[in-house]
Image (cartoon, rainbow, N blue to C red):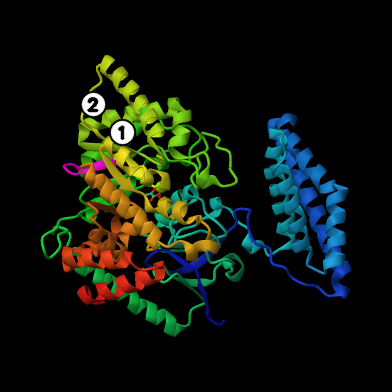
Amino acid sequence: MSEIVLKGIPAAPGIAYGPSFILDKGEFIVPNRSISSSEIDSEIARFEEAVNNARREIQGLKTKITQDMGEGHAKIFDAHLLVLQDATLINAVTCGIRETKSSSEYVFFTVIRKFVEAFAKMPDEYLRERASDVGDISKRVLKHLMDESKLHDLDNLQDDLIIVAHDLSPSDAVSMFNKKIKGFLTDIGGRTSHTAIIAKSLGVPAVVGLKDATLRINNQDSVIIDGKKGLVIINPSLATKELYVKEQSKITASLEKLEDLKSLPAQTIDGKNISILANLELSSEISAVLKYGAGGIGLFRTEFLYMNRLDLPSEEEQYQAYAKAASAIAPFSVTIRTLDIGGDKFISSVQIPRDMSPFLGYRAIRFCLERPDIFKTQLRAILRASVHGKVQMMYPMISGLGELRQANAILNQVKTAMRDEKISFDEHMKVGIMVEVPSAVMMAEPLARETDFFSIGTNDLIQYTLAVDRVNEKTAHLYEPAHPAVLKMIQKTIDAGHNEGIHVALCGEMASDPLFAFLLLGMGIDELSMSAASILAVKRMIRSVKLQDAQRVAYEAMQLATGQEVEEFVNAQLREFLPG
Ligand code: PEP
Ligand code: MG
């Protein structure tokens, strides 16, 4: 078998080698296979047989569920059977095969997609929910038309596999990591999707945005992932394998070398200290945060506590998690971000409508202000944890003073109630905001007067400034951290914060790249927070440069016209101070 190389978007660095496992989550790609005129009848027959098989399966399930759980529970299968008998559907597919001379699976997939879309747009909620039933039915039929090896589910996972999926949600990623997955590959997604972020923080190499990896890779293919370059090598030759074994030992050696930096300060040659902290998604990562010598937790993404469960986490459970992080990282601080769901993060306990543009929709602080019950529970838990170390709190996605004041009003209500109940908390706990929406940048001065610190969320700020969806592989080339417009936004935020005497941190993925971190240092950032595994490489950069050089480079970079020019310029400059 010859070696095939696929190029995608690097999402999490590292090298992994192992057998692939194609994970179907429903949204798999069906290739457009042309057929000849002589194949039309047999293709239609194949389709009819698949529908009959699917029908038989559903009948069998219906009988079983009726026996086990009663007739009421089996009603859903009647609806599935009706869809499979629908003459419009069947005719559309058979005529489609004749007219387009495409394979039955492709025509069926195209037709059924239109059905799903039509259901999803129905004004009636009950009918809208039937869209997922139609989706289930389509999988059932496709299973009989396509290579079964492409269709599996999460429950069948074994250890030590490279997962290949069309898409993975952040909660899928979290649930899989208990299963010692070696790495993962997806057809869609961008560098700062939360799935990529999770992979990075857990040290699992990942490549996203591969477009058709689920088609090109078969189950049990041997696959190498080069997470840093965004490469995937299917059926690697012996020579390629040897190359990667060498590459792996080089990486291990350079990581070992970085270990020496662990206890040294992140200080430039001319004496400027920068705080380097870690981002935390799961409490289980605290050991990694400590291992890499983080100077605190600059972003605790609390939404992961709410994922992969049917109920909401109680105040007590949240308190335990926050207190654990606070005491583990003491005497350094932990900045707990209040719930940021929506966008690409969903939880089962709360139904959030899947907006057309989820990142512009019902998300983060917008959700919390509408659900003070959920928000207050979290605020109480954070306040209670504040006595266990140095706890700070921040709100995500603040777009202006109105939201900040509303959030603080709720916080004050919670504090008053806790004082009445004689529950102790840190009365001086700092409360900051994430600056990740362009309107917040434009309002940075007045916001800085009413908040204790800023933390710039570049993952979102880039997408909102450049109008580039952070999880869309098709526009990934436009998602440029070094775009001059983004740099100006960041500079304005830093300056506004400093003019008003507050601390300005940055916790987007941009912080974890030494090249961008060099720029940010020159722009005057006070603190960088990143995935724990990136800390030592960024520290190495900081310890190799002078603040005054970084300031000059940042100034000159900001005069340039495009993101590409900025990257090339900063790269060339940094190479002088940091060879290799
Ligand atoms: C950001 O937007 O940069 C950020 C750190 O938050 P998240 O990635 O969780 O949206
Ligand atoms: Mg964000």
Q: Residues within 10 Å of mark 2 (few under 14, many from 20)?
A: some
Residue 239 falls in which quadrant of the image?
bottom left
Residue 248 falls in which quadrant of the image?
bottom left
- Residue on which disc 1 sits: 320
Instruction: Please state the horizontal and vertical placement of residue 42, each as a whole percent of the image.
Output: 86, 68
Decide if residue 285 is in sight here.
no
Residue furthest to the bottom in view is 239
Label 1 SS: helix
Instruction: Please state the horizontal and vertical placement of residue 562, each as a whole percent of the image.
Output: 41, 68
- Tag in front: 2 or 1: 2
Residue furthest to the front in view is 559
Read off the magenta span: 330-335
Instruction: Please state the horizontal and vertical placement of residue 469, each as a whole percent of the image.
Output: 51, 55
Residue at image point 53% right, 58% down: 472
Instruction: Decide which of 477, 500 is in the foreground and name it.
Output: 500
Disc 1 marks a residue whose amino acid type is Gln
